[in-house]
Image (spheres, grey):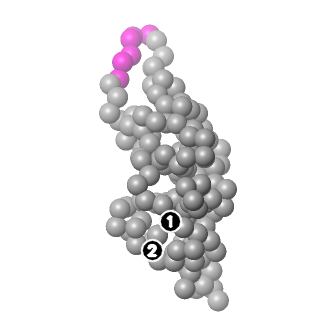
Amino acid sequence: MLIIRDIMTRSPVTVAPQVTLRAAAEILARYGISGMPVVDGRAIIGTLSARDIVDFESTLARIRCSGTPEWDQLADHVVADAMSPVTTTFRPSDPAEKAARYMERTGAHRAVIAENGVLIGILSTVDITRVVAERARE
């Protein structure tokens, strides 16, 4: 049986809720990731994915005056405006199958791993795919 601690990403990239969505998008691009936990101090308060940013941006009105650059709305909104709240966390000792079932059921691409309310890792569909591919090569 696979245990989450054996396949999760430890010390994931995180973002604070007051960071602009422009800066958050740049973090995602810099690290080549599609999402990250949102933390306020030590508290896990949500996750932010590239899809969250796109979905949020698509709800905003387009304002542009002729001859002026388009308004950078991502720079005027913060992570807290677009993040998804964390409703479920998993312990590192949980079976990976439990998190995988959660991701399948909810359509999430990552699960937050916490111990005593403190973020210690993230389990993504990429982590699970990597393990399946490694086992297939054996």
Position of residue 31 measured from the top left corner of the image (x, y, whole percent): 65, 49
**Disc 1 residue type (three-letter):** Phe
Q: Which mark is residue 90?
A: 1
Label total for image: 2
- Residue 122 visible in the current orientation: no
Q: Which mark is residue 37?
A: none
Mark 2 and mark 1: Cα distance apart in space:
8 Å
Q: Residue at x 60, y 84 (%)?
A: 135
Tell me the quadrant of the picture where the C terminus can be found: bottom right
Task: Name the residue beneath numbered marker 2.
Answer: 98
Q: In which quadrant of the rendered view does residue 93 lie? A: bottom right
* Magenta stretch secondary structure, dominant: loop
> Is 104 above or below relative to 97?
above
Position of residue 71 measured from the top left corner of the image (x, y, whole percent): 45, 19
Q: Residue at x 51, y 77 (%)?
A: 95
Q: Could you tell me if the residues under marks 2 and 1 are in contact, i.e. CB atoms within 8 Å?
A: yes
Residue 65 on the magenta span: yes
Secondary structure of the residue carrying numbered label 2: helix
Residue 112 on the magenta span: no
> Is 57 above or below relative to 100?
above
Name, please, the residue furthest toward the front: 116
| Within-10-Å neighbours for mark 1: few <14, some 14–19, many 20+ | many
- Of label 2 and label 1, which has the lower sequence position? 1
Closer mark to the observer between disc 2 and disc 1: 1
**Disc 2 residue type (three-letter):** Lys
Q: Along the line of sight, which residue is nearer the eye, 52 or 37?
A: 37
Tell me the quadrant of the picture where the N terminus can be found: bottom right
Q: Along the line of sight, which residue is nearer the eye, 56 or 84?
A: 84
Q: Along the line of sight, which residue is nearer the eye, 69 or 135?
A: 135
Specify start and end residues of the magenta stretch as a single range: 62-67
